[in-house]
Amino acid sequence: MCEVLNIPRSTYYQSLNKIEPKREIENRQITERMKSIYKESKRRYGAPKIHHQLIEEGIHISLKRVQRLMKKADIHSIVKKKFRPHGSNERVENRENVLKRDFSTSSINEKWVADITYVHTVKDGWCYLASVMDLHSRKIVGYSFSREMTTEIVIKALENAYVTQLPPEGLILHTDLGSQYTSQAFTDHVKSYGITHSFSKKGCPYDNACIESFHAILKKEEVNHMQYLDYKAANIAIFEFIEAWYNRKRKHSSIAYKTPQAIEDQFKVSA
């Protein structure tokens, strides 16, 4: 054939070596898709979530292969720090812990957990986010963002959750022993909704681990990587993180790599 085409044999054999193996073609295509998923998640997704996304799209690939390709392409999720509880020197009276770290559920609006966290801004200093989570779907069903950490912020977060979800009587709401949650005003609101209030023991953040975990995710995937100019800028960013990302797009390993909204929708359809 070389004689017919009048080309040196060395040129022919070199051309054979230039043919890209099928495996390399697949790896390149998969890597491009992984980069897209990674970008869409704003660098938040690591190998497990990218792997599940690829599987959902019909791309059959092992987790180890995903990890190898990610390493080769220098794709890695935002570094996450482990949660470390901090003790408090305040003298707080213990109240009944109804939940007792039983985070299991059989339906939505059966058990809610709530807490407050801090978000710093350049012009307005510290701002505060009060969140309410449904333990069945892990969805943030209510929240309130404010420049002041008052009882009003936790009341508003609970009101938002109640109006949105309209839970049946018998719902358990678990919080810590913060002054906002032990206030008479908040207690009255809880009772008016027919909700049973449960409290963590003093110095036991693991009693409320699920909402603590959400706030840790918020910090590690969003807040710690941004510098918000003021309250308004932070408020918009928090809204987008919760509504556009966390509730509707972010896959959670604790709920079989589904989104909180998908779990809630699935329950409503089957109910």
Image (cartoon, rainbow, N blue to C red):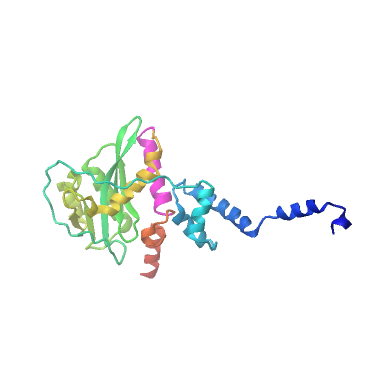
Q: Is residue 224 above or below residue 140?
A: above
Residue 133 visible? The answer is yes
Percent position of residue 194, x then y: 20, 59
Q: Nearer the viewer, residue 144 or 29?
A: 29
Q: Residue at x 51, y 51 (%)?
A: 70
Residue 233 is covered by the magenta coloring: yes
> Can you tell which quarter of the image residue 23 is in?
bottom right
Q: What is the residue that sits farthest to the bottom in this orientation?
A: 270
**Left or right: where 262 falls relative to 1:** left
Q: Quadrant of the C terminus?
A: bottom left
**Left or right: where 200 falls relative to 108:** left
Q: Is residue 48 above or below residue 151?
A: below
Residue 232 is covered by the magenta coloring: yes
Q: Residue at x 34, y 29 (%)?
A: 123
Q: Residue at x 34, y 45 (%)?
A: 81
Q: Quadrant of the N terminus?
A: bottom right
Percent position of residue 44, x then y: 44, 48
Give the magenta range. Answer: 229-248
The chief SS type of the magenta part is: helix
Q: Nearer the viewer, residue 172 or 55?
A: 55
Percent position of residue 173, x then y: 23, 56
**Left or right: where 84 falls relative to 26:** left
Percent position of residue 84, x then y: 27, 46
